[in-house]
Amino acid sequence: MSQIHNKAIFDSLGEDYETHSNVNYYQKIGNGIINFLYNFLNIKSEEMDINILDLCCGTGILTKQLSDTFKNARFLGVDISQIMLKEAQAKEIDRADFIQIDGRDLGTLNYQADLITCNYGIQWLNEDAFIGISKILKSKGYFICSIPGYTLQNVKVSKESVTFTGNKLFKAIIKISNKNCHYQEAKVPEKVMNVWNDTLGEKEIINAALQNNMELVHQEILIFQIDYKNAEDMIQSILSRGTFGDILSEKSDEFIYALTKYMTRMSEKYNNCTEENVTKYLIFKND
Ligand SMILES: C[S@@+](CC[C@H](N)C(=O)[O-])C[C@H]1O[C@@H](n2cnc3c(N)ncnc32)[C@H](O)[C@@H]1O
């Protein structure tokens, strides 16, 4: 994955990224991380003197959840996009600093973390990032990350999910693109597939961690349902995530109008405006 393209995706999202529903979406996934820290790793909320690095912190949604939970910990949020970081800084999160750095260069930081978190970010990096992760993570420290369903091999979705309107968005984009090939968005499915193919998959992540002397101590899949107010809200949220990011910036109003009309019909047909999200959590322990 070209890191320049990667940065451009999130730079182009800028203020569009934090639609209300999108915050809700990342918070749901972030809650999974908090629960594992609490219940699996047994990190207590009053834990003193721990340094938590939030890798690919974006607009700081997880950093804020962590700061609200671990009241005495200190946080360093890092991200490649200054535009995303600006939103994170504006949140004025207690005990948190933010710096712009390419996640693959973590090893250049003069920093030692007790814990590294990464919510929906690690797939954007590459295997070399694990050299830095393992270097700045203290011995016996943990790295916990969440990865989206599309990076998982043989992902299983629940039966009911076929009737969730949100899960039909990708097909709808293809359908509308094919029907109206004069739209610039005619290339959207291909572009999304290219982005997905370029991101790190689950096996690559696990192998890269193992090669850097980190042990996989836990893995678990959680499935969430996200309800939206209406089709417009759902489309705005899904299209403002990374994979669709710079595609959204070149959308035509006409295309979004056609998509909204189609998805509104779908939500009436299925009587819901729900999306299913499949997330895998991986927890590694440093040597
Ligand atoms: C889905 S967002 C992360 C969401 C965030 N963790 C949260 O909880 O809200 C992915 C983030 O990865 C960042 N990113 C992509 N490539 C990166 C890189 N090479 N180094 C650091 N950050 C990167 C993007 O700028 C973006 O902010």
Image (cartoon, grey):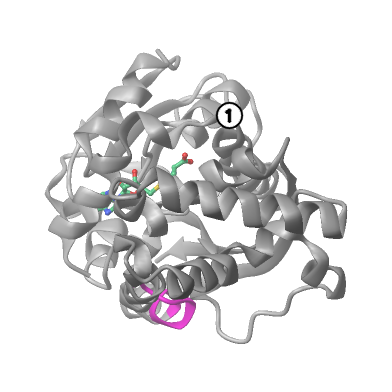
Q: What's the residue at 48%, 72% (across, down)?
A: 179
Q: Nearer the viewer, residue 4 or 186?
A: 186
Residue for badge 1: 20
Q: Quadrant of residue 270?
A: bottom right
Secondary structure mainly formed by the magenta segment? helix
**Which residues are the magenta region?**
199-206
Percent position of residue 195, x then y: 33, 70
Q: Quadrant of residue 204?
A: bottom left
Other residues around mark 1 within 10 Å, as few (<14) / some (14–19) / many (≥20):
few
Asked if ligand 1 lies within 8 A of label 1, the reply is: no
Instruction: Please check the rendered image and state whether residue 200 is part of the magenta-colored stretch, yes or no.
Output: yes
127 in relation to 133, above or below? below
Decide if residue 123 is on the left or right side of residue 26. Answer: left
Percent position of residue 128, x then y: 21, 70
Decide if residue 223 is on the left or right side of residue 236. Answer: right
Percent position of residue 87, x then y: 35, 24
Q: Nearer the viewer, residue 120 or 158?
A: 158
Q: What's the residue at 36%, 79% (across, down)?
A: 197
Q: Nearer the viewer, residue 126 or 212?
A: 126
Q: Is residue 117 visible?
A: no
Q: Secondary structure at mark 1?
A: helix
Q: Which amino acid, mark 1? A: His
Q: Is residue 150 visible?
A: yes
* Quarter of the figure with the N terminus: bottom left
Decide if residue 284 is on the left or right side of residue 208. Answer: right
174 in relation to 40, above or below? below
Count of numbered labels shown in the rendering: 1
